[in-house]
Image: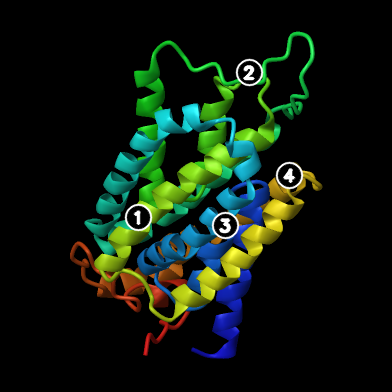
Amino acid sequence: MDLTRAALLAGGAAVAGVINAVAGGGTLVSFPAAIAAGLAPLPANATNAVALTPASLASAWAYRRELSRDYRVLRVLLLPSLLGGIVGSALLLVTPQRVFDAAVPGLVLLATLLLFWQNLRPPRPSAKGGAGVSEEFALPSRPWLVFLLQFLVSVYGGYFGAGIGIMMLALLSSFAGNVDIHRMNAIKTVLASLINGVAAIAFVFAGAVDAVATPIMMAAAVVGSFAGAAVARRIEPRKVRWFVVVLGLVLTAKLAWDRFGPAAEPSRAARPDSPPQTVDRGATAAGTGFAPTSTG
């Protein structure tokens, strides 16, 4: 791999680690960086999931102070996160490459719109105690509903991943009362680590990841996550989120044009349907305008 591609991978992963720790939505940076470095969408997604798992764990460790109070909530949400991550990663591995290629613009747009919606919501005040302020999660009387919603979020996370942090923050907000946003972010980070970790194991055993790109992205993302968690309490997450929204909209348009625009017609007509569980890194790289990455 040449230095330009390595720099794309490392830079995208490092920025994603920072964004995930601060605001969520980092996959909207690291995923297109992997495609720009030459990976086809399906292996780029699998490689991204594997590479960002240690970064999520690093962020979770950085939030250990906030997590010390919320083991009760984690116990409720861990099982549906585990099951959903398994189901989502299995769905990705049996999805034909051409189907995933066609779905990618819509998935990126969905994640971007979720982030856009989160930006439009009024900011949550940080709970500092006092009259009328609850500093504990009020778990709903119907825990099965929370279980189901978290399971569905986790299925999506195991399949694609971008935006799961935003989805989980929205779910936690529904029964968080005035709990500090940093505590919700800490829980979200742990659950994202579990979902990504389950998917990463499945992708590695299926041979769906790029052996050269993964360690480059992994190291950069861990550094970014530690940096992001360290500054998360000092910067305004909305500013980061708005930048990611703009990036996501541009990326959606680019991916949709590459896949469905006039220039894509000849390559689609000439390319046969790929079988399930394909990990051919070059099968769709031509459709995005990048050469396939050599894995040595």
Position above or below: 199 against 284: above
Spatial separation of the CA atoms under disc 2 and disc 1: 31 Å
Q: Position of residue 28 (x, y in %)?
A: 56, 56
Answer with the quarter of the image where residue 76 lies: top left
What residue would you read off at disc 4?
237
Report the amino acid beneath label 2: Gly
What residue would you read off at disc 3?
58
Instruction: Give the crowd class for mark 3: few <14, some 14-19, many >=20 residues within 10 Å.
Output: many
Mark 4 in CB contact with mark 3 (< 8 angstroms): no
Instruction: Give the crowd class for mark 4: few <14, some 14-19, many >=20 residues within 10 Å.
Output: some
Q: Residue at x 78, y 9 (%)?
A: 131
Q: Residue at x 59, y 30 (%)?
A: 69
Report the amino acid beneath label 4: Pro
Answer with the quarter of the image where residue 250 lies: bottom right
Report the amino acid beneath label 1: Ala
Left or right: 208 in relation to 168: left
Mark 4 in CB contact with mark 2 (< 8 angstroms): no
What residue would you read off at disc 2?
177
What residue would you read off at disc 1?
199
N-terminal label among 1 and 4: 1
Q: Position of residue 200 (x, y in %)?
A: 36, 60
Instruction: Give the crowd class for mark 2: few <14, some 14-19, many >=20 residues within 10 Å.
Output: some
Q: Position of residue 249 (x, y in %)?
A: 60, 52
